[in-house]
């Protein structure tokens, strides 16, 4: 009887797993195909190959089926529904005080030409938008819901390809902004100082053109006032910002038994460091001191730190930590800390704010000796 019950339980478990797998398969077959097509497009883009128009057509057919909410509510757009493909293009004026403000519009790039080409931006048909920011604020610019593979570039001082033009920001795919992991839409979210910005709404390549949805959101939080002179230890280095910053893109070089001071200025900001272990395997401890650590620069300044350690290939994090020790009611120790054994090689680690927090921090890397 006992054996019979064990067999029955095992059969029921297998049946449950089978039904769950069948349910997932029946639930979204388009999702699996969309992911495959998205990977094909991503691979072509990563190797600087042109994406065929037919592959784009299949992607957007599947994306409409899987993510219909991205393409809803195209009515009620701003009257400025077709930007110009010549600089300065359409004019958008931000609010003159710290208030929320949403601008949105739709249109098409079918008749546009490529006036801001690679390497300044991309190779598609492009449009220009002149944005005037009157008040320091966190601003999000997106093309979420567009019908082609969009790319955003932002310049200061002058339009793209004009004398004095300075690159400010750019983005290809922004899943964290659009909320879709397979998106081909762009998004830029960062702090904008008062001034004039020249935005290019581009297509990734020659086959990327069509209907677009464009929006600018002023969040009305005036950004977090940066701490330009943090009271960090005298022997700590100062984190230097650069663009773009990320795993295998830009990183401050740091060595064993060295510290840095930095600040997460806005939601999504990353501070990235490169550590090279050259002589022998070592046990490495990376400590971040932020909002929860008394006696440190960032104590009660708002940053709930998140720490990630990556291999040189940037494929997947080796370790992740948010709250190592301390927190509400017990603010002792480090906010984030990772102890890991590393063989000789180069590693990246990034510091950012969990739960959209910002603020200053101190960071220190301690390494064991080769004799240990």
Image (cartoon, rainbow, N blue to C red):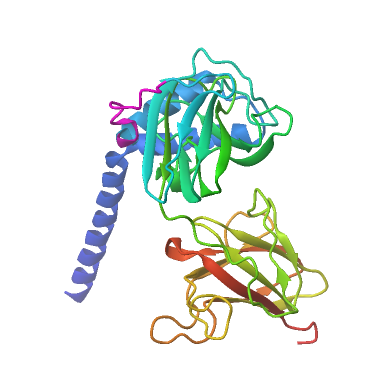
| 70 within the magenta span | yes
The answer to which of 312 and 8 lies nearer the viewer is: 312
Count every numbered label the image shows and give the total.
0
Q: Quadrant of residue 371?
A: bottom right
Give me the residue at 63% from left, 28% from top. 122
The segment highlighted magenta reads 69-81
Instruction: Give the residue at the far left of this rendering.
Output: 1
x, y percent for residue 146: 42, 29
**Is residue 318 at least partly visible in the picture?**
no
x, y percent for residue 190: 52, 49
Q: Quadrant of residue 34?
A: top left
Instruction: Give the residue at the far front of this rendering.
Output: 96
Relative to residue 277, is residue 106 depicted above or below? above
The answer to which of 24 and 114 lies nearer the viewer is: 114
* Figure quadrant of the C terminus: bottom right
Give me the residue at 65% from left, 29% from top. 160
Give the side of residue 178 with respect to residue 236, left or right.
Answer: left
Instruction: Give the residue at the far right of this rendering.
Output: 279
Relative to residue 194, is residue 73 depicted above or below? above
Give me the residue at 81% from left, 69% from top. 278
x, y percent for residue 69: 30, 36
Give the side of residue 38 with respect to residue 3, left or right.
Answer: right
Relative to residue 102, is residue 91 depicted above or below? above
Give the side of residue 308 with respect to residue 23, left or right.
Answer: right
Give me the residue at 76% from left, 71% from top. 255
* Figure quadrant of the N terminus: bottom left
| 341 within the magenta span | no
């Amino acid at each position: 009887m006992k054996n019979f019950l064990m067999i029955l339980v095992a059969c029921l478990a297998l049946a449950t797993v089978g039904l769950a797998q069948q349910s997932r398969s029946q639930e979204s077959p388009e999702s699996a195909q969309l992911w495959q097509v998205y990977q094909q497009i991503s691979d072509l883009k990563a190797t600087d190959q042109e994406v065929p128009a037919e592959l784009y057509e299949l992607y957007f057919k599947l994306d409409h089926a899987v993510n219909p909410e991205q393409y809803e509510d195209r009515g009620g757009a701003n009257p400025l529904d077709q930007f110009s493909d010549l600089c300065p293009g359409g004019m958008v004026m931000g609010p003159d005080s710290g208030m929320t403000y949403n601008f949105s519009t739709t249109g098409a790039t079918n008749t546009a030409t490529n006036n801001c080409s690679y390497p300044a931006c991309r190779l598609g048909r492009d449009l220009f938008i002149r944005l005037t920011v009157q008040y320091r604020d966190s601003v999000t610019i997106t093309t979420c819901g567009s019908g082609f593979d969009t790319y955003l570039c932002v310049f200061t001082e002058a339009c793209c390809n004009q004398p004095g033009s300075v690159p400010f920001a750019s983005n290809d795919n922004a899943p964290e902004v659009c909320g879709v992991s397979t998106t081909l839409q762009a998004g830029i979210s960062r702090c904008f100082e008062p001034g004039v910005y020249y935005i290019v709404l581009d297509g990734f390549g020659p086959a990327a053109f069509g209907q677009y949805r464009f929006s600018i959101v002023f969040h009305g939080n005036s950004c977090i006032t940066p701490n330009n002179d943090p009271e960090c230890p005298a022997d700590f280095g100062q984190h230097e910002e650069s663009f773009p910053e990320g795993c295998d893109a830009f990183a401050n070089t740091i060595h064993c038994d060295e510290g840095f001071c930095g600040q997460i200025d806005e939601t999504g900001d990353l501070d990235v460091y490169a550590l090279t272990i050259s002589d022998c395997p070592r046990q490495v401890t990376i400590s971040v001191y932020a909002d929860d650590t008394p006696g440190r620069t960032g104590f009660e300044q708002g940053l709930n730190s998140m720490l990630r350690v990556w291999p040189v290939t940037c494929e997947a994090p080796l370790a992740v930590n948010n709250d190592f020790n301390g927190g509400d009611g017990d603010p002792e120790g480090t906010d984030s800390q990772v102890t890991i054994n590393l063989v000789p090689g180069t590693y990246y680690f990034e510091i950012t704010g969990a739960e959209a927090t910002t603020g200053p921090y101190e960071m220190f890397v301690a390494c064991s000796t080769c004799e240990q």
